[in-house]
Image (tube, rainbow, N blue to C red):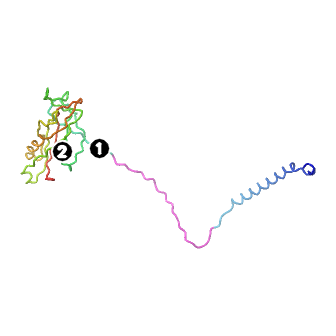
Amino acid sequence: MSDWRNPKYDLRREAHPVFAQALSLSLAVITLLFLTSLSFEPAPREGGGDYEIIDIEEIPETNQLRAPAPPTRPQMPVPTMDEDVPEDITIPDTDLSLDIPLPSARPALGGGRNGIAGSGENRVHTAWEEAPMLTRMVMPDYPPDARSRRLEGFVELRIVVDASGNVTEADVVRADPPGIFEDKAIEAIMKWKYRPARLRNEPVSVRITQTVEFTLRGR
């Protein structure tokens, strides 16, 4: 191959000036095109046709308002026969549904200094770890006079549930209307049966309040 090389032409030596000239020319053309495009302004298209105009409106951010929390329901004091009960003993809030005729036990919390009234086997606790639960309910007889007069009402009783779950005492706390349903309420509640309350994992006798309702629905 070296026998055919013309010593007058050295391609390696002449390639560098040619490449530099080509690069300079390319940069000049690119610069000219760039400057020309900056001044280019497209002409609006003329002709018929329908155009849809879109208005962009800025919508302010919506702040969500939260309703204030309901006020705390006041706690009600619990009536008791013991004189040494602290005045700040209360019962927790209870949601009462008037549409359900079944009564709900409302235990009286608290008690004497040790939560016990009486002594020996007859002592009655007014504080416990596990409340008594109603397991058998006997519906009271409706007084004939109240039925004929279409009267409805309730009787609130303070009862003693012993360690076997039997009702041994029942005293009227209040009645509405008074003098109508008290006897029938006591007669029925003495037949009720409870799962006894427990204190220190032992069944105990306790005093609670229980409401017996008299309604003509379903009678």
Viewer-nearest of discs 1 and 2: 2
Q: Residue 93 at what x, y percent from top left?
A: 25, 41
Where does the magenta region start and end?
44-68
Q: Amino acid at mark 1?
A: Pro
Does residue 125 sit above or below 56 in this rendering?
A: above
Q: Secondary structure at mark 1?
A: loop
Residue displayed at 13% across by 48% down: 214
Question: Foreground residue, 173 or 169?
Answer: 169
Residue displayed at 23% across by 34% down: 130
Q: Residue 9 at what x, y percent from top left?
A: 91, 51
Q: Amino acid at mark 2?
A: Pro
- Is 59 colored magenta in this rendering? yes
According to the picture, the residue beneath numbered tag 2 turns out to be 103
Q: Residue 135 at what x, y percent from top left?
A: 19, 41
The residue sitting at the top extreme is: 120
- Is 164 colored magenta in this rendering? no
Residue 71, numbered label:
1
